[in-house]
Image: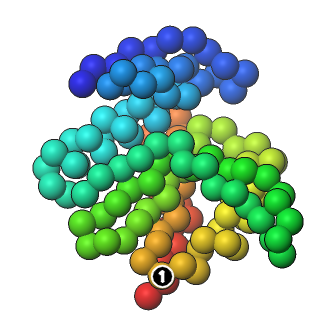
Amino acid sequence: MTWYQKTTNKYHNKSTEYGGSIFDSKLEAGYAEELDIRKMAGDIKDWERQIKISLDINGVHLCNYYVDFLIHHNDGTKEYVEIKGFETPIWRLKWKIFEAYYGDLPDTTLTVIKQKSNWKAKFGSYKKQ
């Protein structure tokens, strides 16, 4: 369960390897490690990464959106998690479309974990009661 940094991209993220996979940033790799620990502890059932979501409206395909993580909780609920170090205008637009499409689904939570300096802040969690 060790990880190390590789290269830097245009947003100054450092691609990082963890568990035999390459993640787009150190923050994503760290979150994957956290999810593995939670799974081993029995806190969550399972998790997946880079989930492709087709964003379609009225039968018209707008674009694909790749969510960083999908967590399967023990109670059967799902949580889509996006890790952000830097927000782009296109990401904000795609996230709004994603929220409109998935935000009201029962037993589904949408979460953004945003990096600010050396700490994470959660915002944008939605859960239909």
For residue 87, what is the image quadrant? top right
Residue 77: image x %, image y %? 36, 71
Residue 121 appears anywhere in the view: no
The residue identified by callout 1 is 106
Residue 53 in the figure: left or right of residue 33 = right
Residue at the spot x=54%, y=48% of the render? 51
Residue at the spot x=42%, y=77% of the render? 107
Residue situated furthest top in the rendering: 6
Q: From the image, which quarter does the N terminus lie in? A: top left
Residue 3 in the figure: left or right of residue 99 = left
Give the camera-side residue of 79 and 120: 79
Q: From the image, which quarter does the C terminus lie in? A: bottom left
Tell me the SS state at disc 1: loop
Residue situated furthest front in the rendering: 59
Residue 122: image x %, image y %? 48, 56
Q: Amino acid at mark 1?
A: Pro
Up-down: is 70 above or below 29? below
